[in-house]
Image (cartoon, rainbow, N blue to C red):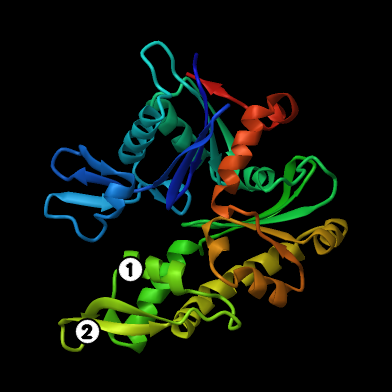
Amino acid sequence: MAKIVGIDLGTANTLMCVKGQGIVLRKPSVVAMSKATGEVVALGQQARRMLGKTPEGIVAFRPMKEGIVADYSAITQMIRSFLEEIDAIAFFSRPSVIVSIPFGSTEVARRAVEDAVFEAGAKSVALVDEPIAAALGSRVRVNSPKGKMIVDIGGGTTEVAVISLNGVVTSRTLRVAGDTMDSAIVDYLEKQRRFLIGLSTAEALKIKFGSAHPSISKGEADVFGRNLLSGMGEQIRVSSDELREALAEPAEKIIRGIASTLEKTPPELSSDISDFGIILTGGGAMLSGMNILLRERLGIAVKTPEKPLESVCNGILRIIESEGELGSLLRYRNR
């Protein structure tokens, strides 16, 4: 029988779920391709390990950028490979696929995702807005008239949305997210320490030693990179306090984006949000102290689900397994 598959197609990671099976795939959204032939030589974690290290003739990159398709051929091949890995494509059957997409995406961006999924082997495709999926995956009642605010900090974008009655009342998509934080760490060390590291190293530092609030310190880390004064490879020690200073600017931009969205929210729903709190999801929600910082700066309680990185995919899974209740959120297109 044809499977029903949900895809959280993120800039940094792709997650897939299947009706009756739960989340069945978690892979970095990275592709390594031959420059000469366009043939994919590696995907997922294997390709991610190649970032910044590829030999001449091979390029490793993310085919999604800031929540939109940046390389159509690469994203199509990546999705098809992942669908084949979970046995969703068979000779006589093709899956129905539900894909999350940033709210407010242009019609061109939405059509690019649909076409890529069709090209990858789907028989029908439906798109669901990421804030709705993230709310459902966080066990929030999206059909309630009471307003709920979702802040989903992904790899390429941060989605800030107020939800009520199965729809998004007001929202804002920020081009500040996990990738921005990684770049901020690279820039900080380059300017303050005259020391150069790669984005992958910066991401590892952020995950293990980064924090957003001064009450949380994670000690120090030894980092390998290049001394820009001598041009030689070197190891230095970086403190958690330095990382927090590096992350301060992107964190501040996220706070301002949330505050701006709250200012545009109808008063009745603002009152609901003050009572219920903000739901913080996405990979950025796992940055230590981010919830504390938002709570202190905005004066509103912040709640984070147990597995914030899986919130969107879990939300799609809820839709798939409760079509009688939530099927109105979907509009399939067939090919």
Under circle 2, the secondary element is loop
Under circle 1, the secondary element is helix
The image shows residue 243 at horizontal and vertical percentages of 45, 79
The image shows residue 316 at horizontal and vertical percentages of 60, 37
**On screen, residue 331 above or below 8:** above
Q: Which residue type does callout 2 highlight?
A: Leu
Does residue 26 appear to the left or right of 44 in the view shown? right
Label 2: few (<14), some (14–19) or many (≥20) C-alpha neighbours in 10 Å: some
Instruction: Look at 60% across and 47% down and name the residue there.
Output: 311
Which residue is at the far front? Answer: 219
Q: Which residue type does callout 1 highlight?
A: Thr
Gap in Å between the C-alphas at discs 2 and 1? 17 Å
Sooner in the amino-acid sequence: mark 2 or mark 1 = 1
Which residue was labeled with disc 1? 201
**On screen, residue 75 above or below 204:** above
The image shows residue 121 at horizontal and vertical percentages of 40, 24
**On screen, residue 283 above or below 37:** below
- Front residue of 95 and 175: 95
> In the rendering, which numbered label is found on residue 312?
none
Foreground label between 2 and 1: 1
Q: Give the quadrant of residue 130.
A: top right
Which residue was labeled with disc 2? 228
Instruction: Look at 67% across and 65% down and name the residue there.
Output: 258
Label 1: few (<14), some (14–19) or many (≥20) C-alpha neighbours in 10 Å: some
Does residue 21 appear to the left or right of 76 in the view shown? right
- Front residue of 35 and 195: 195
Instruction: Look at 44% across and 51% down and name the residue there.
Output: 11
